[in-house]
Structures are given as structure tokens and as C-alpha cells.
Image: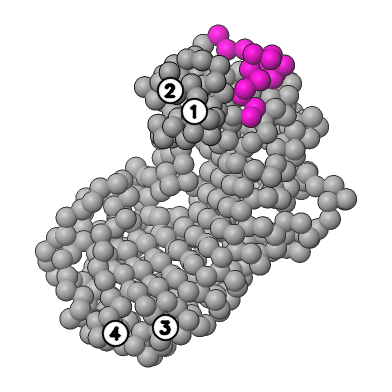
Amino acid sequence: MVTEYLPPETLAQIFKSKGTDLRGSVAEELKNYSLTCSRWRFPAQRELFSNFTITSLNCPRSPGSLPYSVIAKDRRYSHLGPAIRRLHIALLVSSEADPHFYLFLEQLAAVSTITFTHSSALMFFQREVFTPDMRAALKGLFRLPSFTTLVVASPGFPLALIPSCIHVRTLVMHSYTCGSQPNLDSWYHLRSDEDGLAEFSHIETIDLLGDSKYIDGFTTWFRDPKRGMSTRGIRHATIQFFLNRPAGPQTIFCNFGNVTHLTIRFVLKVHNPGKYDSFSPASCERSTKMYVAVAVPTPGDQIYLDFADPRPPTTDVKYLVNLRSLRFEIPETGQNRLLVDVRATITILHTWIMPFLYNLPSPSQLQNLELYLITPDDGRQPQPMSGTDFFARIWAGLDEYMDVYFLALKRLVLYTPWATEYGSMLPNCARRGVIGRVSYP
């Protein structure tokens, strides 16, 4: 058989090409590959177990599974530790934890991504569960050179753990509980005195979702010099305001002085992450119920904006001095009622997005601006609708401002559900050749 002589690297690429959804037929196919011959076994197992989900701190979800501590000691399962690269902790029910669960964590040697979903953090970090042995095992896991992405979409995750993730490049923190504060309990601190305080400065991408109270609380904690962290390396940031929008004095953007790419998304619905084994950071944007954050006017009630004196929606816009790319998204509410979406969108445009643009400290540096209005959040590609463009006056004011201040702008992307000729409403941008209408990605 020719494939017997393929090197392990080639086999790994072949098995990896089967896809990342390791359920059903794909998992069965990889399992069969692992049983074909000894040369195929490890490359196939490495891909089969690359995504591993923990739903209980006692044993795996398969019927008749052994406790995790037994699996860690059994040589028959020695392939698991090197194979697991994406670890999903999605504890579904509170059950008695295996007191030696930490032995399983100690076997993990190649994890690149750890994800907490559902109420996992609340259960995982109970003091009776988070024993000294568990603490030491988790510290070792967080210090793996391969561990570069931490995704938290579960309440109760202690922020004191983050400084121990010394190689993390991407940090995702999502909170779907209104009025909640981050868990600031310093009891969970993992760093020791010999670790120093200038070690944690590697984050390049940060993604925050929550109401303004949660995001403000997180960013205030994050820049505290006592944490030993640095925001100097952050270049890409995503802020998703959940249900309400900040106004007045804020400290959200104080950390983002070096950010060059910023995305701001307004989430007006309640999150339903779906199945634990299909979770990804992108799925944090799924929703099922609609809650409009504020009472919104009809389109005809709020068409004018005082462009002579647009007050900033949040006072810390002044810290965004290095922006090169800026993206705003306003998803549809999901009620299949266009007027509700138009009302919410016009309110956000007038009270937040437009004043935000008008108060940027370095508008002449901005090269890319994207505005996605009333976008689908479930993968649909909507057909453009005919009808009145409710935003004509907004585009006219923006066009005049950008022509004077956005001198380096190379790309302006607009999305609305309407088939609109933006060139006629944005003549200055059209003249400069920077405007384009695209399908929502």
C-alpha cells in the first residue's frame, strides 16, 4: 500500500483536511483510520482528539467512561495528552468532582485554546474544587508555550487567573448578564513572587462583550499596574456592547492607545450559545430573544444631528490615537420587523456612532471605515429591499465631514438592506473613489 510510506506530517495534513467538526461520520472515519495500522494510529488520534470537551469534573460523557484520574494514569490513554489542542470546558451540571481530576490536566502538553462556556467557571472555581493541586495543574496549563487563546463565555471566571496566561495572544471575555461585575477575587491569584510583574504583555487581540458596567469594570482592572500586565501590544480590539451603550465618563478605551483595528458591535438580543460542543467565539453572536435597550423614536422623529457640536458618546474616545481601521456593526433584532430595526439603528447612529466619528483624536490617520447596519446574525444573506433610505441626511453630513478630516481614507464600506446608490448621497467619497457597497460577510 502506497500510503504506508507517507511521512507522519503528510498523514496529519490528510486527516486534518477532514474538517474541524469532529462529530458523526468525521469522527467515525478518523477512528477507523487510527485502527488501520500503527503508522496511522497517532496522526489519526491526534486529529480525532484535537477538540476535547469536558462536561463533568468526574468522567467523560461517554457511557461507562472511567474517571479522569484513572484515564491520566492508564497508559492506554497516553495519546490523549499530546493530542488535545482545543480544550472546551462546558460543565453542564454540578456533580461531585474527581478529587484527582488535576492529574488529567497535568497530561495536557499541546493545548492552544481553552474555552469556558455555560456556568463552567462558577462550578470549576468553587473553592472546594479549586484545591492546591488543581491550582498547580492549572498554572502549568496556563504556562504552556502553545497556549495562546483564552475564551471565557461563562460568569464567575476569576480575572486574577489571567496574568498567569503568559503566552496568550488572544483574549476573549464575554458576559451575558446585565449589571454583573467581573470576578475580582484575588484569592485565585496564581502568580508567585518570583514571577515578577512585567511578564504579561503579549496580548495582541482582545474581544470584550458585556454591558457597559462589565466592560468598564474589566478594563479598569486590566490596566491596574499592580496586575503586572501591559496593554502596549494590543493592536486589534472588538467591543460588543450588550443591551445598553455607555455614555458620559468611561474608561473603556483608555487601554487602547496602540490599537490600530477596532470593531464596535451593538448586541440588542439575549445570547443562546447552543450546544456546548459547537461553541466558538463567533457563536457568541447568536441570539434568540430581542430586547431593545432604549425607547427609540420613529425614523421621522430623529433625522437631524447637530454636526456643529456633536458631544462624544464616551469621554475616553480621545485615547484612540493610532486607529487605522474602524468597523461598526448593528445587527437586526430578529423580530422580522424592519421598522423596529430602523428605529434602533437611527438611535445608535445619532447618539453613538456619528459623535464617535466626529470626536476621533486622529481622523486624518483613518484608512478604513466600515458601517454594517441591520445585519443578519444567523448566516443568512438577505436580499436588498427597495424603499426609502432613512439615513440620507446622516450620509450627507458624514460625507462632508470625511471630505475635510478623513484625509487618508482609502476604503469606506457601507451595508444596509436597501438597494441604494450611495454615490449620489456621498458625492465627495465617490469622487475620491473610496466608497464601496458589499455583501455582509
Q: Residue at x 35, y 71 (%)?
A: 349
Q: CA distance from mark 3 to mark 4?
A: 11 Å
Disc with the residue nearer the chain's start (1 vs 4): 1
Dot 4, how many residues are within 10 Å of its Cα: few (below 14), some (14-19), or many (20+)? few
* Magenta-tinted stretch: 64-82
Q: Residue at x 17, y 81 (%)?
A: 424
Badge 3 amino acid: Ala
Badge 2 amino acid: Val
The residue indicated by pointer 1 is: 6
Residue 71 part of the magenta segment: yes
- In the image, 355: left or right of 319? left
Q: Nearer the viewer's eye, disc 1 or disc 4?
A: 1
Q: Nearer the viewer's eye, disc 1 or disc 3?
A: 1
Q: Tell me where residue 345 sits by quadrant.
A: bottom left
Badge 1 amino acid: Leu
Q: Measured from the top left, where is residue 246 in percent x and y?
A: 50, 66
The residue indicated by pointer 2 is: 2
**Against 197, is 435 above or below?**
below
Q: CA distance from mark 2 to mark 4?
A: 59 Å
Q: CA distance from mark 1 to mark 3?
A: 52 Å
Q: CA distance from mark 2 to mark 1?
A: 7 Å
The residue indicated by pointer 4 is: 432
Q: Secondary structure at mark 4?
A: helix
Q: Nearer the viewer's eye, disc 3 or disc 2?
A: 2
Q: Nearer the viewer, residue 288 or 136?
A: 136
Q: Measured from the top left, where is residue 29 in percent x and y?
A: 40, 21
The residue indicated by pointer 3 is: 408
Disc with the residue nearer the chain's start (3 vs 4): 3
